[in-house]
Image: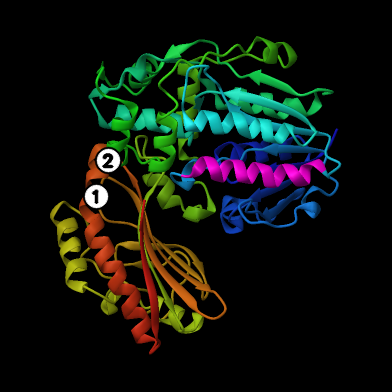
Amino acid sequence: MSRNILVVGASGYIGSHLVPQLLKLGHHVTATGRNLKLLEKRGWGNIDNLTLVELDLDIDQDLTDLFADIDTVYFLVHGMNHGHDFIEFELDCAKHFSQYLALSNVKHLIYLGALQSPTSQSKHLMARKETGNILRDSGKCVTELRAGIIIGPGSAAFEVMQDFVYHLPIMLTPRWVTSRNSPIALRNLLYYLTQLIDCPQDKNLILDVAGPEQMTYKDQMVRLSKVHGKTIRVIPLKWLSPQMATYWLRFITSVPTNIARALIGGLSCDLPADGSELQRRIPQHLISYEEAIQETLIMNTEVVKSEIWGFDPDALLRWQTGYGYYPKQAGYTLKTDASCEDLWRQVQLVGGEEGYFYANGLWRVREWMDAMIGGDALKRYRRDPQQLQLGDQIDSWKVISLEKNHFLSLLFGMKAPGLGRLEFTIEDCGDHRTIDIRAWWHPKGFMGLLYWFAMMPAHLFIFRGMTHALVKRCKAKIQQGNIETK
C-alpha cells in the first residue's frame, strides 16, 4: 500500500540510497536536506511522487507543515561532520524535531541508530542512543534500528577501512582493531528499513541489525585486502590510543576528518549485535562480507553517475577502483558588490589565450609538468573566446556543468593520481554577491593524497588571487574573503 513518507536526512549516506528504494515501492516521499541544491544534484529534481524540502534542524523554525499528511517518518540525521560540538548539535536537532513530531498525526517513526556497548565512552555512540530517547519522548511509536558498520559505497566506516587498505601495506593500529562488530551489507539494511513500513507497530522497539557473522576490525581489513588482491599486515600497539590515531586521519583517508574521528572514537569496545528478532520479523538472506564488498565495487562508479559530475561520460570512463569515494576540497570565497552578470562575464573568459586571471606562470609550470609525463596540457584550445557551453574543451579542462550567472564546473584533464574538477560558484546574497573558486579531488591511493597536499598551498594562493582578480576586472569593491579546506 502506498504511503506518504518523510525522510529526514535524505542527503546523507543512507538517505540517498533509501529514497530511490521507497520510490520504487510506489510510496510518495518528501525528502529533506540542509542543502536543497545537493538534493537536486542527485538527479531528484523532477521525479514523480518526490518532494524536496530544504530543512536545517539547527534553525528554530515551525515544522508543522512538514508533517502534513505524513504516515511514516525516517529520521536519519547525525552531526558527525559538524565538528567538536557535534553531540550538542545532534541532540538539539532531535529535540526540535521531536517537539513538532509530538503534535503531528504521524503513526510511526523509524530511526537508524548505532550498536551500543555497556563499557564504551564514545561520544558518537552516546549521542546516537540519546537521540533515540528524545524521539521516543514525542509519544509516537518509534522503531529504532541499531546498526554497526555498513558495507556499501560511501559508508564512512567502510571507506575509512578501504583507504587504510589502499594506502598502507603495514598498519600500526590501536588495540581497538581486535574489537568485534557485525558488519551488514547495504542491500540487507535497506531491505529491513523499507519493510518496516508494513510491520504493524503498537509499541516502541529497539532492534539490533546484524550481518551473518561477528568480526574483528582487523579481520575485516585483512579480508577486504584479499578481495582487492592486496596483502596488508596489521600490528596492534598497546600504547597507541584511538585519540592518537585520529591525528593522522586526514593524511590517510579521504573521508571527512570530523566523521572519521567520531567513528574511530566508537571502536574501542566490542559492539555485539543480536539480529535474531529483526530477522524473525523481516526474514531475508544475509549476504557474506566478501559478497557485500563485491557488490560495493560494482556500485563504486555511482559517485560520478550524478549531476555533480554532469553525468559526464569522460568522468565515468576515468573513474577507477581505488579512488577515494569522498573528495578532498580547497577553495576561496570572496564577498563583493559586483553583479552576478559581471562576475559571470569574467568567469567565462577562463583559459585559452586569456589564461587563468592570476599567477599564469604557475599554471604554465603545471602544464609543462603534465607534458613531461606524456600529457597534452600544452595544447591550448577554446571554441569561443567569449562564451562557454556544455561540453566545451578549455585547454586540458572540459565543461561538465554550466548554469548562467551562477555556476561553472570543469573536469580536470591533466595526468595525476586521481579525478578532480574545478568549480566557479556565484551566489546572490541580496546586499552582496559571493564568488567561490574551489577544487575537488578524489585521490587514487596514497600517491593521490600526497599529490593533493603538495598542491594545496598553490591552490589556496592561486584561488585567492583569482577571486580578487575577477572582482577587480568587474571594477567592483572587495568586501571579505574566506579560505576553506577539507
Image disc number at residue 453: 1
Q: Residues within 10 Å of mark 2 (few under 14, many from 20)?
A: some
Structural distance between the alpha carbons of marks 2 and 1: 8 Å
Decide if residue 13 is in sight here: yes
Please tell me whether mark 2 sits on a helix, a strand or a loop. Answer: helix
For mark 2, what is the residue? 251
Q: Are marks 2 and 1 in contact (CB under 8 Å)?
A: yes
Residue 99 magenta: yes
Report the quarter where the N terminus lies: top right
Q: Does residue 224 appear to the left or right of 173 in the view shown?
A: right
Q: Which callout, 2 or 1, points at the residue further toward the start of the chain?
A: 2
Q: Based on the displayed image, in which of its 4 quarters is residue 446 positioned?
A: top left
Decide if residue 218 is in sight here: no
Q: Does residue 354 appear to the left or right of 427 in the view shown?
A: left
Measuring 56% from the left and 40% from the top, which residue is drawn there?
A: 78
Image disc number at residue 108: none
Whole-percent x, y for residue 402 in the image: 49, 67
Is residue 334 depicted above or below 198 in this figure? below
Q: Does residue 176 appear to the left or right of 432 in the view shown?
A: left
